Image (spheres, helix red, strand yellow):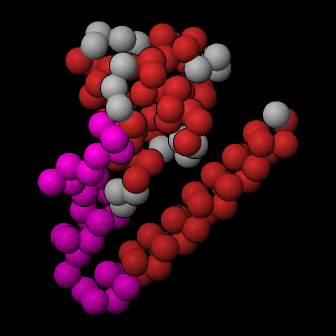
Amino acid sequence: MNDINMIIARNILTILKKQNKKQVDLAEALQTNKQTISKMLNGARMINAIELKQVSDFLGVKMEELTKIPAHIPDTDIIHVFMGKVESEQAKNALQIADKLSDMILFHSRVRENGTEMMEV
């Protein structure tokens, strides 16, 4: 599944690479640790608006460049890719259910993590 956080993460990674900057540099600029940046850039943690602004300032780009949606987005979700190879309707339905369940688990995990972080501040 390609959500906006993954699109933003890919855009940030692309710009970091172009500018020859590292995740640790970004972590330092955002006054956080590399693990948090890694979670943000692999989709395990949502990027909030304040962090997005800090990232755009650090990279010297407009926020619109970080949030732009490319014309073609490759589907990298393993379940979706695998579903194209499954022939039985029953197996496809089971994979769709598994996909929805994993999305729900990830969503609630992210909400909990972000809520915990917000309580700390």
User: Taking the image as drawn, is residue 79 in sight?
Assistant: yes
* In the image: residue 39, left or right of residue 90: right
Q: Quadrant of residue 119?
A: top right
On screen, 115 above or below 15?
A: below
Image coordinates of residue 85 in percent, x first then y, are 19, 70
Q: Quadrant of the N terminus?
A: bottom left
On screen, 74 above or below 103?
A: above
Is residue 57 highlighted in magenta? no
Image coordinates of residue 56 in percent, x first then y, are 42, 27
Q: Residue drawn 76% across and 39% down?
A: 117
Give the farthest residue toward the bottom: 89
Range of the magenta residues?
A: 64-93
Question: How many dots with numbers?
Answer: 0
On screen, 85 above or below 52?
A: below
* In the image: residue 78, left or right of residue 121: left
Is residue 83 highlighted in magenta? yes
Give the farthest residue toward the front: 62
Seen from the viewer's position, the closer of residues 107 and 67 is: 67
Image coordinates of residue 84 in percent, x first then y, are 20, 71
* In the image: residue 65, left or right of residue 41: left
Q: Residue drawn 48% across and 10% down?
A: 25
On screen, 11 above or below 30?
A: below
Seen from the viewer's position, the closer of residues 70 and 23 is: 70
Q: Residue drawn 44% across and 70% down?
A: 99
Q: Quadrant of the C terminus?
A: top right
Q: Residue drawn 29% across and 24% down?
A: 15
User: Taking the image as drawn, is residue 23 in sight?
Assistant: no
Q: Quadrant of residue 42?
A: top left
